[in-house]
Image: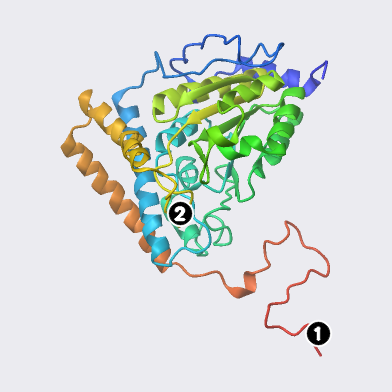
Amino acid sequence: MAETTKATRSRRTRGAARQDTGASGAESEAAARDADAGPAGAENAQAPAGTAGGADADAETLVAYYRQMLLIRRFEERAARAYTQAKIGGYCHLNLGEEATIVGLMAALRPTDYLFTNYREHGYALAKGIDARSVMAELYGRSTGVSKGWGGSMHMFDVKTRLLGGYGIVGGQLPLATGAALAVSYKGGDEVVMCHMGDGTAAIGAFHESLNIAALWNLPVVFVVINNGLGMGTTVDRSAAEPELWRRGAAYRMESARVDGTDVLAVREAARTAVERARTESKPYLLEATSPRLRGHSVVDPARYRSAEEKEALKAADPLAAMALRLEEAGILDAEARDKLDAEVTAEIEDAAAFADDSPHPDVSTLFDYTYATPVPSELRRLPADPVFRS
């Protein structure tokens, strides 16, 4: 588009005038321009963001980040156990190993910003502010869950925290997130849309279509690719002609960067840069976070495609252990305080599991309540055992 709309221009003016308190602090050091980032004319592509550089945080903030990472870790471990006990049904994909990425990304958002995610979303729901009880109850399929038990592990949705869904179809969230960003821009708001996805999503048509339209229309959306090196059991190197996925933004002249997803401060700073560009300039951004997946693709995947050496390397890449060591070496959190914090978090997760266990299943009469957003004439509400015709 040669000209931005009046609403977009107005939005940019307001965004530049209003500072984001949630994204204040040290900005990540600008990465060097990479002449080989993409085809001629893709001058907005950036080299990898690397580490946080000058990023800093006080002791209280660092401990809060560590606690949130620990909460996600213990929640996912408890969810894995509940799945083996047949208390969680359907598919279940865990965020084990992605805790630093999740916390860093969510730290860059305001409560009013929107989040679209894929089916690996438990940690994002927790970090977006949804209570652990509600998330666990949703996994258990109970009516006290965040989606009243009808969404389960892969389809959480919460208007209050602006988590606008986990999506089971690979890339299904991208067009929706792009549309939400268009709505924000059209109305002249200052919210940002963040759209999270896995590395496999970068190969599908909706990825390219969404990035293209976001760049053409100057939409306030941050696309985040979590690259754990595997699309289910296939390595990114074997499935992607360009395995450095952040470079794909160059095809759309979109600012882009790669960040170490095991470093919560590095992720936060990289995400702040992306979010602020979207908020104040109404420009989309592509951020790639390299983040390990400590277990298989889903709870039932034994990950036999990994060698013994790869499994050992994963242990060394554990972001939670790295954060604990970082805090201990800085004199912020010693072993005793860490154990106390772990006990508190474990008790919170056990309480969430007990709450889910004690919560009721949805009543059968509500089975069709959420098929449509509004009432539909002649809607079929026949249960499997009901006769086709009633006398």
Q: Which numbered disc flags the more N-terminal residue, 2 or 1?
A: 2
Q: Give the x, y percent position of residue 37.
A: 61, 15
The residue positioned 66% from the left and 26% from the top of the image is: 220
Local crowd at mark 1 within 10 Å, few (<14), some, or many (≥20)?
A: few
Decide if residue 232 is on the left or right side of residue 174. Answer: left
* Badge 2 amino acid: Asp
Quarter holding the N terminus is top right
How far across and down, in percent of the image, does residue 200 sit? Answer: 59, 39
Q: Which mark is residue 267?
A: none
Residue that appears at 45% across and 54% down: 301
Front position in the image: 70 or 340: 70
Task: Report the residue marked by disc 1.
Answer: 389
Q: Position of residue 374 (x, y in %)?
A: 75, 58
Dot 2 falls on a residue whose secondary structure is loop
Label 2 neighbourhood size at 10 Å, few (<14), some (14-19), many (20+)? few
Height in image: 255 above or below 108?
A: above
Q: Secondary structure at mark 1?
A: loop
| Disc on res. 301 | 2
The amino acid type, in three-letter code, at marker 1 is: Phe
